Amino acid sequence: MSHWQTICEVDALQANSGVCALVEGQQVAVFYMPKSQSVFALHNYDPFAKANVLSRGIIGDLKGEPIVASPVYKQHFNLKTGCCLEDETVKIPAYSVRIDQSHVQINLDYD
Amino acid sequence: MNTPKKTLVVIGNGMVGHHFLTSLVNSPIKETYHIVTFCEEPRAAYDRVHLSAFFSGQTADDLSLVEPGFFEQHGITLHIGDKAAQINREEQTVLSDKGVLIHYDTLVLATGSFPFVPPVPGHDRPECLVYRTIEDLEAIATVAQKSKVGVVVGGGLLGLEAAKALHDLGLKTHVVEFAPRLMAVQLDEAGGAMLRHKIEHLGVTVHTGKNTQLITDGEHCFNKMCFADGEELETDLILFSAGIRPRDDIARACGLEVGSRGGIVIDNQCKTSDANIYAIGECALWNGMIYGLVAPGYTMARTVVTDLASQPASFTGADMSTKLKLMGVDVASIGDAHAKSQGALTYTYQNGDLEVYKRIVVSADKKHLLGAVLVGDASGYSTLLQYCLNGIELPEHPDTLILPSRSDESGGLGPDALPLSAQICSCYDVSKGDICQAIEAGCSTVGDLKAGTKAGSGCGGCAALVKSVLNSELTKQGVTVNTDLCEHFAYTRQDLFTLIKVEKITTFDDLIEKHGHGLGCDICKPTVASILASNWNDFVLKPELAPLQDSNDAFLANIQKDGTYSVVPRIAGGEISPDMLITLGQVGKKYQLYTKITGGQRVDLFGARVEQLPLIWKDLIDAGFESGHAYGKSLRTVKSCVGSNWCRYGVDDSVGLAIELENRYKGLRSPHKIKFAVSGCTRECAEAQGKDVGIIATEHGWSLYVCGNGGMKPRHADLFATHLDKETLIKYIDRFLSFYIRTADRLQRTSVWMENMEGGLDYLKSVIIEDNLGLCEQLEEQMQHVVDTYQCEWKTTIEDESKLKRFKHFINSDQADDNIVFIEERGQLRPAETKDQKHFKLVEVA
C-alpha cells in the first residue's frame, strides 16, 4: 500500500543541494535538481561516518547516475538506489519522493 | 660465528668524505668494518657548494649534509674537532692532535684542499680572509660589519660566488683577477667579456690583468692594494679566492707518492702508492689532474666503496662541464670550451641587446660537439651536454643549436635520442637507464623519480630533462597522462582558471554548459567554486554558489566526525587582548563547546550543532571577532613570534607585519590551504621556514622563504629573496600567491606545485622577481581585487535572514539531531563513542 505524505513546499528545498526532513521520527535527506525538476530522497545517516549528514553532501552525477558525496569521508551514494559506489556491500534506504503541485511528498515504504 | 671486524679510518668529513660514508653504509660490506672518521672542523660535513646561502639567512644546521642520528645509527665513531696528525704506515696507525691512536686495516684520505693565498707582502693583515669554511664566513661577516669596501682576489667560479656574498653584505665590491678575463678556465675571451659586462652592471667593479704586489695601510680604508702596473685600490676587506691547493701534508709526511705540484697520486681504483690507503676528492691527483668540483669527488668515493667490495671499479676522469648562476647571470661551460682540439670549428652567437653569448666547438667533420660556452642564457646546457658526452651526431647545421628559434619549434634534443647509458643527473650519477627502470617499476611523476632515483635532487640542473624522459617513456608505455579535472571537464584546473578569467564566467552552470557536460561532482564543483572566488570574490553562500562549496565552506565551519562543527575566529598574528580572550571563554561556556588552542595561534571551539552556528557567530561578531576561514582552502594564519617590541633579540616587529599580512590576504581562496609565519630574527621562533610563505627579519631587511610545509611530508621552505623592504615584500607575495592560484592543480600545496614546475625555484624567481612572463602587473591586480572586496562571510550571513535558512538540521522541525551525544572528559565535552549513540539500524545487502 503506498502512503504519500507531504513534508514541505518546493521553496523549502535548496536548489542543487539537499535538506533534511523529519518524517515519522526518521531523518530523510531530500535532494532537488530544479533544472530537471527531479527530487530524490535517501536516509540521512552516513554509515561510514556514523552521523546524520548526507543532506549536506555535494550532489551531481557520475557516469550518468545521480549521486551525493558524503560530506565527511566523500563516499558516493546513488540517489536513486542508495547504493554506495565505493563499497557494494553498503546500501542506504532510498525513498520515493515527488513534487505534486508545489508539495514535496514522500513515501517511506520501501522494499 | 663472528669474524672480527676490520677497521676503516676516514680522514676528513667534508662533502666527499661524507659521501664516502653514506655510500659505504648503503653497501653490504659495511658489516665487515668498524668505521672511524676524523673531522678537523668543529662540525660534521656541510654543503660548501652553497656556502653563500649562509649570508642570506641559512644557518650551519641548514647547510648540514648529515642526516640526524647518522653516525650513531650506523655505529660510526666520529672524532669531531680533532685533526688526524700522523700516519704510521708500518704500524698501520693514525694519531690525532688530541692523542687518539687508532690501528687501521684500510685508510681513506679525504683531506680536501685549502685556499691558495698568494705570498704578497701584507697578505696576512687582519682584514685579509679566505672563503672555505663556515668559520671563514663568520670572520667575513665580522670584518664586513666595520667595512665599506671589499675586494675579492680571483675572478674564477668561487671568486665570483664570494663577490656576490660581499655584495649582499652591502659592501662596495671589486673583483681583482690576474688573468685577462673572468673565469679564464671555463670561458673564452668574448664569453668572459660578456660576463664582465653583466656583473659590472650589477654594481661590482671588475679589474682584470692585475698583479697584486703589496698590501699596506690605506688612507680612506683599512688597506691599500698596489698592483704591478702602478695602480692602487683602497679597500677594507680582502678576500682571497685564487684557487685551491690539495691538502697532502699528512700523506707527504708518511712517504706516500705526491705530485710535483701537490696532490696525492692515485690510480684508477683511487689507491695511493700504499695498497691499504686510498685518497679521494680534492686532495687526490689522478692522471696529473686535481678535480676541484664535487661531482668527480663523489665518483671517486663510490669507486672506493665498489673496490672495497671486490667489484670491478675504476675512476677514469670526469667531465668538468659546469652550469651555474653567478650573481644572477647564467654561465655554462662544456668540454673543450677553448677549441684546443685539432681542426675544431667554432660557431658563435652574440646578442648585444639581451646580453647573450653562445659558442659551440665542433669536430672537424662537423659530426660531434666538443665543447660550448654559454653566458646570459644557459637554457641549452642539458641538450648540448648530452650531445657532447654521448657523441650524438649533430644536425646538418650545428649552429641551429645556438641560434634562437623564432618559431615554436624547439631545437632541443628529444629524450629518445639519448642512449640508455646517458648520464642525466651528474650529482647522483643517474643514467637514462636508471630512470627508465624506475618508471617501469611504477614511478609516474617527477616527485616519484626524485624520491626513487635521487635524479634532480642535487643541483636541480637536470630537472627539465628528467621530466622530458618521463613524459616520453610514459607515452611509449601507452600511458596517456590524463590531466582532466574529472569526467565533467576535459580540462586541467589551470585551463579552467583561464577560461573563467578570460570569458568572465561567474557561475558553475554557465561554465559546464559552455565547456563541460553532465551535472558536475564533488571534485569539479568545489574546484570551480574556488576559482570563481579567487577571481571574482563573490559571497560563497550566494544561492548559485552555495551548492558548489565543499563540506566546510558550505556551512562556514569545520565538520567533525559526528556531524557537529568547530568554529575558529580570526586572531590575526596570534595577538589577542584579554577582553577578547574572555569573550572566547564566555562563548565556549555558553554553548558548552570543547576548546583547544590550534597550531596556528588561535582557538578552536568544537561541538557546535549546525543550528547553533549563527547564534555563536552573532555573539562573536558583536564582540568584534570575524571569520577565521579555517573552513576554506584559503589563507589560514600568519603565525608570529613576539618580535622586537618585547624580545631582547628581536630585530623587527614580526607581530605587526604578521597582522598586516593576515589582514591583507584573509579570505583569499586558493588551490589548497596557505599558511604564513613571520619571525622577528634568525632564531626563527615562528617556524617560518615550515610555511608556504615565511618571512624572517634581518638587520638588512626581510628575508622571504617560500613553498615550505609541515604535515605528512614536511618540506623546508626555499630562500626566495633577501634585503626586502615591506613594500617589495608584499609585492612579491602578491605575485607569488596569484601565480600559485592561477597555475597549481587542485589540492596542490605550494611545495609540490613548485617541485613539479619546470625550472623550479629559479623559474619562479624569474617570473616573480624579473617578470620574464610580463605577468606581474596582472598578478598584482588579481590580488588587489581580492583585497578590495574582502568581506567577513559570517557577518554577511547573519545579516541576511534568507541565508540562515540552511543552518537548521530539519526543514520541518526545530528538533536537534538526536544522534549527537556528548560525554565528559577532562572537564570538557567530547563526542560519545558509537556504542553510546542511538541511531537507526543499517540495511545492508550482501
Image: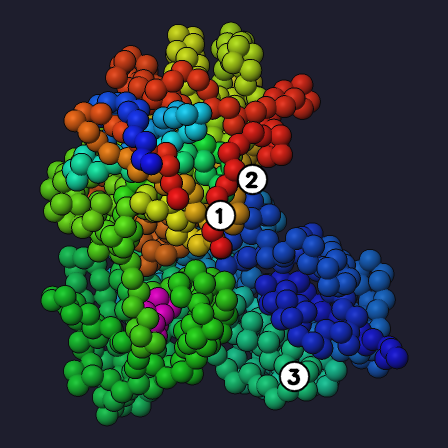
Q: Nearer the N terminus, badge 3 or badge 1?
A: 3
Give the image quarter of residue B351: bottom left
In the picture of the structure, the residue carrying the numbered disc 3 is B307
Q: x, y (%) of residue B797?
A: 31, 18
Q: What amino acid is labelled 2 in the image? A: Thr
Q: Which mark is residue B142?
A: 2
Q: x, y (%) of residue B767?
A: 27, 48
Q: Nearer the N terminus, badge 3 or badge 2?
A: 2
Q: Is residue B72 magenta?
A: no
What range of the chain is rendered magenta? B466-474
Q: What amino acid is labelled 1 in the image? A: Glu
In the picture of the structure, the residue carrying the numbered disc 1 is B844
Q: Nearer the viewer, mark 3 or mark 1?
A: 1
User: Do the residues under discs 3 and 1 have CB atoms within 8 angstroms?
Assistant: no
- Farthest-out residue, right: B1
Q: What amino acid is labelled 3 in the image? A: Asp
Q: Nearer the N terminus, badge 2 or badge 1?
A: 2
Magenta segment main secondary structure: helix
Q: Nearer the viewer, mark 3 or mark 2?
A: 3
Task: Identify which residue is drawn at 16% across, 26% down.
Answer: A101
Give the image quarter of residue B407: bottom left
